[in-house]
Amino acid sequence: MRNRYCVIMAGGVGSRFWPVSRNSMPKQFLDITGSGKTFLRETFDRFAKILPAENIFVVTGRIYADIVNRQLPELKDENILLEPYGRNTAPCIAYALYKLLAKDPEATMAVAPSDHWIKDEDLFLKDIQAAFDHAEHNPSLVTLGIKPTRPETNYGYIQVSSSSQNKYKGGAMPVKTFTEKPDLEMAEIFVKSGEFYWNSGIFVWKLSTIREELEKYMPELAAQFDGWRDALWTDGEDDFIEKAYGDCPKISIDYAVMEKTDKAWLIPAEFGWSDLGTWESLYRCASDVDDRGNVSRVEDCLVSDTEGSLVLSTEKDKLVVIKGLKDFIVVNTDDVLMVCPRDEAAVKQVVTDLSMSDFNRYK
């Protein structure tokens, strides 16, 4: 599979996993699930089962270069693409696209976020292989769609027709629409219809296909990378990317291309997935739930009269005592203690309040 590559997007700040995730050490570089590996390491190891290390690239912020080097020592410096500023996923993908075009114009590229939870990795890799096969033989932008298990309002949705599901059972299906995060009423309609899948944000495409669609639907972004042939893979790459990103629009690949293209195809997936973006999503994916619905990630913890709560501490040799809570999140670090309802809106408000206060040093 010499012409197959993977690009891991690892540039976010993970603010909703505060106070464990900080600007200086975001969630993708942490072991929040307790697996013994960071999100980034897990994602790399997953793809390394089907691709050589030299075909795996990581896109991240310049300030995280040393962290990526430490966590993935087998990666060459040239495989770590450093963004001067965060500009969402479309510029990130454009950078990787032109970088790989200069190396291997015939390549097919998988793009994956660095912070996803995958339950069945063998099934996941089977679907990725199917996506590679489809993209290599068809001018398609392939995405993995997750069969929804509930009316989730934090995910985008992808619609396929019911006739397509029957016709293309077991394979890729043409996409009808992309919809951003709906309200609960609309999410319930989506799930009931059977035509909608969660948008995983995992894509596979030939470089030639995504280039054509990017330059067609987002020419202003593509124009920022004019001159890429002469600049990338040279000593002038950093300066070129600094200039390119200076005027890059801040936009997702969904808005920039996927919602506009007529080449979007979906492979239905059921390998067990979560976009681990919040404490609530971590709670839902936990396998170590006690008989009262509590999840404890604490070395020494005494919990009583408490249910439906998540308790996590990064400090060892410290007893954590919890009593009388229901549906709460308790997170303890060396410099912050957060106790708040498990409601995702509550945690979001905490992060917002932090940004508007005099406590920026804790971000």
Image (cartoon, rainbow, N blue to C red):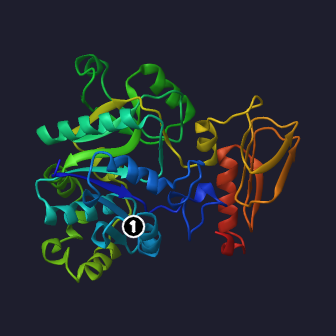
User: Which x, y percent locates residue 295?
Assistant: 71, 40
**Side of 228 relative to 154 (left or right):** left
* Residue 316 drawn above or below residue 135: below
Tag 1, which secondary structure?
loop
User: Which x, y percent locates residue 78?
Assistant: 27, 71
* Residue 201 drawn above or below residue 284: below
Residue at the location (50% across, 31% down)? 187
Q: Nearer the viewer, residue 260 or 77?
A: 77
Residue at the location (43% across, 20% down)? 193
Q: Nearer the viewer, residue 240 or 187?
A: 240
Residue at the location (58% across, 59% down)? 15
* Residue 228 drawn above or below residue 288: below
Q: Is residue 229 visible?
A: yes
Q: Residues within 10 Å of mark 1 (few under 14, many from 20)?
A: few
Q: Nearer the viewer, residue 58 or 264?
A: 58
- Residue type at mark 1 is Pro
Count of numbered circles on the image: 1
User: Which x, y percent locates residue 55?
Assistant: 25, 57
Quarter of the image for residue 260 reads top left
**Side of 185 relative to 311 (left or right):** left
Q: Quadrant where the C terminus lies? A: bottom right
**Side of 332 relative to 264 (left or right):** right
Instruction: Report which residue position mark 1 lands on.
Output: 73
Q: Is residue 263 visible?
A: no
User: Which x, y percent locates residue 18?
Assistant: 64, 59
Residue at the location (81% across, 47% down)? 301
* Residue 123 drawn above or below residue 276: above
**Side of 285 relative to 228 (left or right):** right
